[in-house]
Image (cartoon, helix red, strand yellow):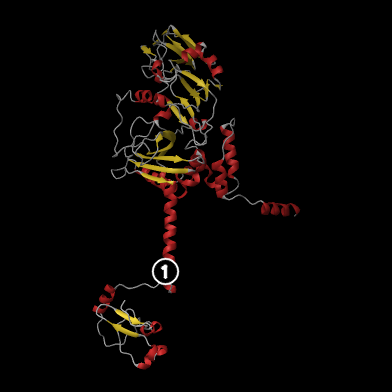
Amino acid sequence: MYEELCTLVREHLKPADGIVISRYRFYTHNGLEYQSVAEFIADLRRLAGPSKFWTVLADMMRDFFVIDVAGALYRQWIPDTNFNNVTNWDKGRIPCKNDRVQFPRDKSFSVFVQSPLDLMEMYIPLDGEFILTHGAGFAASDGQSEPGCERGEDIIFKDPDQYKWYDPKYWQTASSTSDLENENYLFIVDEESIPCQHDDIIFRPGTSFRVDLDSDTQDINVKTISIMNRKFASSENFGEYKRSNTGKLQFHGNGSIAVTNAKCEDKSGCECGNSGNLERICSNLQQESGGHCPELVCTNPLKPQGHCCEICGAIIYLEYGPDFELESYQAQLIHSFLGLKNYKGVQISMTKVSKKQSSKQTFPIDAVPHIQITLIDNETESAIGTLAAALAREIMEDITFQGDVFGITNAELQKSTNSEGQEGGNLTAGAIAGIVAGVIIAVLLMGSLIFFIISGRIRVKIPSVLIDFKSYYNFDTGEAIDKGFSNPMFDPPVNLSPDSYGLYSGENAINIVTTQSETNFVNPLFDEHDFGKKDC
């Protein structure tokens, strides 16, 4: 009995958090600097609490990682130089025991071998190495045929020098290592599809590789870099690895990787740092298409900053003040929009770019940091950007009502869906406040005017045109009409009996005098006898 009473008291004094509070704590939680993804997810589940939030927690966990909320991303290199990878051979298969295996003589290789192999012949390069896992190796073939390999043929390892650091085709981007494993990749503009200065770089465990570092800038800055389950967090340690025989075979070109282990300290976000190589990025990306962009099905396509080709969709440019926090606004977009079923097919990217301020002034304005929100429909044949444009409009409406809460001072919308959709909308903080204040003032003025008219403090004079119009259509029906009280200013003269003057009978009665042009009355309090007859 005692324990039951204690439980009731505890529940009364500390009730379970509601779903709103749980969601707030969930979306505003940031992981610790050295916290693993598993520990971070465990914290998110704990913050969800014992509320109804658990019923939608799975969806919210997925949506949490749709947009980067940690200020840095995980970038994984795709190509490898593994012997057991069929894409590395010109025949599209792994060599069988009767094949003649050839590595180009003048190329450098670091080849990862994952299993034991029987081979008839193998020609190795002058400069290269084989990295063997446990139990892997080469043995001479007995020459007997096997199914699918009755007659051996020449099979050639492809040129690994084709894989370039600044080629978006060779990178995968995700918000966490678990998303990389589950293939939950992010949509980002081409410039940022290459590792940015605050990103973690991963070369998959159990692989070797060769990457061309040719760059138009001296340094390639990254936060950390992981190779064969070994993580480098400083340029000194990575430099030692790069100078090793394996490092020399895996990295080549004029670029130099600088491992800084630096996080983005700007709460409004940091620029990627790849703008100096954008031309190289686009050239590598469009090499197979001959430098041409794909055809689009929308009219008035848009070209986001940092993107190589135009898109169908919408772009929102945000100007912001000192109170703007990128992570908070990202959480707002996730909470308010990305969880809606209507917009499941929209991909969104948020990047920090330099752009000229929106201004009507004639003199030039230096470029200032903006937040660029790029929205596109999923990559399908019918992706004309209609859904993305609809979401962009809703985001703009949300900025109108509460943009100042997040420190947003101006928002510009561009749409590509149709010719009318290429309209830009600017909403400054002053304009937003002015609209709201104007509506409030108009309502107050209208209410005050109606109140004064009803209370009689304001008398409305009816124009003479309306009086004539009323008289023109005043048909005699033979019935008595109640006209209320008589107004000496506007009513026509009538013949009144002497007794009908009421209080102003006799000498004090008001005399109505009618002329052709106007109707006047004589006030007995200011009778002309008091002043004498004078011409005015």
Q: Nearer the viewer, residue 452 or 176?
A: 452
Q: Image height check: is 511 above or below 232? A: below
Q: Image height check: is 115 above or below 320? A: above
Which residue corresponds to the image point at 50% horizontal and 10% vertical from the top-left? 245
User: Can residue 136 be seen?
Assistant: no
Q: Amino acid at mark 1?
A: Ile
Relative image position of residue 375 (x, y in whole percent): 39, 39
Asked which quadrant contains residue 348, the reply is top left
Relative image position of residue 204 (x, y in whole percent): 49, 23
Q: Is residue 93 left or right of residue 45?
A: left
Helix, strand or loop at label 1? It is helix
Q: Nearer the viewer, residue 267 or 526?
A: 526
Which residue corresponds to the image point at 30% horizontal and 89% vertical from the top-left? 495
Q: Work out which quarter of the rendered image holds the N terminus and state it.
A: bottom right
For label 1, the residue is 450
Q: Image height check: is 429 above or below 71? A: below
Within 10 angstroms of label 1, few (less than 14), some, or many (20 or more) residues?
few
Relative image position of residue 292 (x, y in whole percent): 29, 27
Which residue corresponds to the image point at 41% horizontal and 49% vertical from the top-left? 431
